[in-house]
């Protein structure tokens, strides 16, 4: 079983719509959760992180965490063509692992005009 | 201008050669990491270092070596023992406050191709 799972996509949404990206993780003791955006051929860039259950908003982005269901999601409101990229979910597992992150394989998002 | 730099951007290696990838950061971060990314796969951790003169193996350390003589620098050597080195190599750094609050930031990457 993969430790961090994401649907590889592609997920296609029309411009202006809400894109919903999902991630599940296996380690129930995981502490912190990160979303990175990666354009083709480039390195990942941090979008946002979340530690506590509930929602965290930053501009057009909202991260949602449900530790009981071991599920974290990223919502992108008013999707733009420039949001087309691969979105990586990363999880910091249980205490004692330092700052090591476990990454999912990413979901490719395509925002269509 | 703070950040993480990696060089070279592209690197070509012949069979049997060792090559060294450079990673430098001026963010004053204590921790540094090396990842490998293959097409369609997530990032896999090769080595990481939480303090100068100390480093630990990640999930796929075989065929790689690192050093951490300075806080700012964490070079990665891909040895001839690494059988399939063609990949995109990413260096990252983070603070070391603990509690899962440390965010990793990535350099621009080095794309290594074996000829």
Image: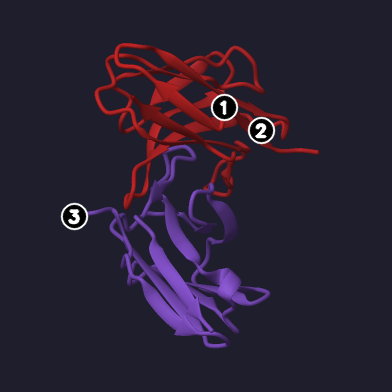
Chain colours: A purple, B red
Q: Chain of mark 3?
A: A
Of residues A88 and B86, the one nearer the viewer is B86
The image shows residue A8 at horizontal and vertical percentages of 32, 65
Which residue is disc 3 drawn over?
A1
Q: Is residue B64 left or right of residue B93?
A: left
* Residue sticking out furthest to the right: B1
User: How much space separates mark 3 and mark 2, taking CA atoms?
Assistant: 33 Å
Mark 3 touches mark 2? (CB < 8 Å)? no
Which residue is disc 1 drawn over?
B8
Which residue is disc 2 drawn over?
B29
* Residue sticking out furthest to the front: B115
User: Considering only order in the chain, which callout, 2 or 1, is on the residue closer to the N terminus?
Assistant: 1
**Residue at left offset 65%, top offset 35%:** B4
**Residue at left offset 56%, top offset 44%:** B104
Q: Residues within 10 Å of mark 3 (few under 14, many from 20)?
A: few
Looking at the rendered structure, the secondary structure element under dot 3 is loop
């Amino acid at each position: 079983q993969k430790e961090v799972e994401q649907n590889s996509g592609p997920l296609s949404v029309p411009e202006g719509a809400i894109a919903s990206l999902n991630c599940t993780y296996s380690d129930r003791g995981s502490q912190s959760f990160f979303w990175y955006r990666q354009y083709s051929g480039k390195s990942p860039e941090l979008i946002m992180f979340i530690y506590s259950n509930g929602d965290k908003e930053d501009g057009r982005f909202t991260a949602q965490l449900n530790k009981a269901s071991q599920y974290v999601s990223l919502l992108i409101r008013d999707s733009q063509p420039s949001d087309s990229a691969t979105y990586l979910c990363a999880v910091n597992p249980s205490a004692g692992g330092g700052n090591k992150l476990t990454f999912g394989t990413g979901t490719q998002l395509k925002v269509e005009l | 201008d703070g950040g993480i730099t990696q060089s070279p951007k592209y690197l070509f290696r012949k069979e049997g050669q060792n090559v060294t990838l450079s990673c430098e950061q001026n963010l004053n971060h204590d921790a540094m990491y090396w990842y490998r990314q293959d097409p369609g796969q997530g990032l896999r951790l090769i080595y990481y270092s939480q303090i100068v003169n100390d480093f630990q193996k990640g999930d796929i350390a075989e065929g790689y070596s690192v050093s951490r003589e300075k806080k700012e620098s964490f070079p990665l050597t891909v040895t001839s023992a690494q059988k399939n080195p063609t990949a995109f190599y990413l260096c990252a750094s983070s603070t070391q406050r603990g509690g899962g609050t440390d965010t990793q930031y990535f350099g621009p990457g080095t794309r290594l191709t074996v000829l």
